[in-house]
Amino acid sequence: MYKKRIADKLLDGLLEASGAVLIEGPKWCGKTTTAEQHASSVIYMNDPAIEEQIKLIDGISIKRLLKGATPRLIDEWQVMPRLWDAIRFEVDHRDNGIGQFILTGSAVPAKRDSIQHSGTGRFSWLTMRTMSLWESGESSGEVSLEELFNGKQADAGERKIEIDELAFLASRGGWPEALTMGKKAALKQASLYIDAVCNTDISRVDNVRRDSTFCHKLLRSYARNIGTQASISTLVSDIVTNDIDSMNEATLASYLTALRMIFLIEDMPAWNPNLKSKSAIRTSDTRYFTDPSIAVASLAIGPHDLLNDLKTFGYIFENMAIRDLRVYADALDGHVYHFRDRNGLECDAVIHLRNGHYGLVEIKLGGKTSIEEGVASLKKLASRIDTVHMPAPSFMMVLTGVGQYAYTRPDGVQVVPLGCLKD
């Protein structure tokens, strides 16, 4: 049975505003399945039964593929890149050019040399992610991020996720297919995903042959550095130290570019607020995977290993929390950033909406001491923001892994378990 996604609402909105919507995101995140819920007709470009016909059509009349009830879903559109320009033309010349097409495809991008026009004004883009805990049914959703922005306090949420369940959820990840499987099979999905990426996808991105073994080593190094602003030179040094291998920075950078293009990694940019002081802000991106299970699988560990190494578990949980915050921020037309200055003052996540409102979030696996540390950091950052030139934060929140209740502290800081949150 199909589980509703936050992307469903976003897709509806884009179809009302543009002629065609291109859905992008990591493979296996559910792009085609979600698109099918909104389509009135579908053509699957990679269907072997029509492959030869498609080749003939490509040379004769591409417009035949565009006929059908709208919105028409064209799945794996990159099989025939010329479809892009044909759709742009069709949107321009139909009486009602709004909501005509949905395009989905492999995480590997189409060859751009066959495309003449950018699609500006006709196409919209929707980035889908793996499922948040709210979408997978593992968050109670009693605390709404939108309501926090509107001034409501987090005083009604309850959802106790035991630490062993939390370790499983981080290791399984938000892959839709994994939700229907037994635990052993579900935990295997991220490893299969990594193998597919390293063996084929990373070389198909730009038709540059890349080494599968080194790809695995790079992902392992990346997993050891998630939640940090590790430089490329740091990653190179880590690989050399831990794997007794050699690699130059330029080559490693090309691997990282390819991994971004197929949505396996998604680093977090820095936030630049107006501050009262002239303290320099560090602008390096923070390293994250699109899903925490990729980090777990890259390290060749599992839930029990996380329980035996709470420091590593803390970083993995942070990646899971960032994934969920990104999904929820998408629904609010917002983005997620991090903050760090040269003196070491940090904020794990800043959710900044298009209207200028923002919330400050510290992410903690659990425990009273760590919550107090998070609160202190939030207050310190808030006190340095120049509220003459920008608004004060809409809320400050410590987002926890282990904890049963959401509540508002006397100082106004919200303490919210991830298992209570939704968009």
Image (cartoon, helix red, strand yellow):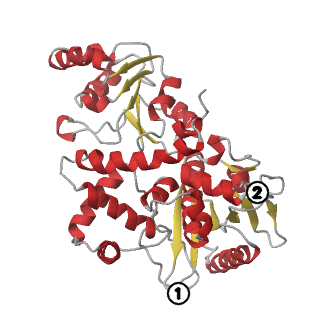
Q: Quadrant of residue 81?
A: top left
- Does the residue at mark 1 contact the one at mark 2 (Cβ under 8 Å)? no
SS of the residue at dot 1? loop
Q: Is residue 286 visible?
A: no
Q: Say which residue appears at 55% left-offset and 69% top-offset.
A: 312
Residue at label 1? 343
For residue 387, above or below residue 135: below
Q: Say which residue appears at 21% left-offset and 48% top-offset.
A: 206
**Image location (x, y in percent) of residue 76:** 33, 30
Q: Nearer the viewer, mark 1 or mark 2?
A: 1
**Image location (x, y in percent) of residue 372:** 73, 77
Tell me the crowding category of disc 1: few under 14, some 14 to 19, or many 20 or more residues within 10 angstroms, Cα based.
few
For residue 275, above or below residue 70: below
Q: Is residue 304 visible?
A: yes
Residue at label 2? 151
Query: Which of the two residues, 387 or 251, is positioned nearer the viewer here?
Result: 251
Q: The residue under label 2 is which amino acid type?
A: Gly
SS of the residue at dot 2? loop
Query: Which of the two residues, 354 or 290, is positioned nearer the viewer here?
Result: 290
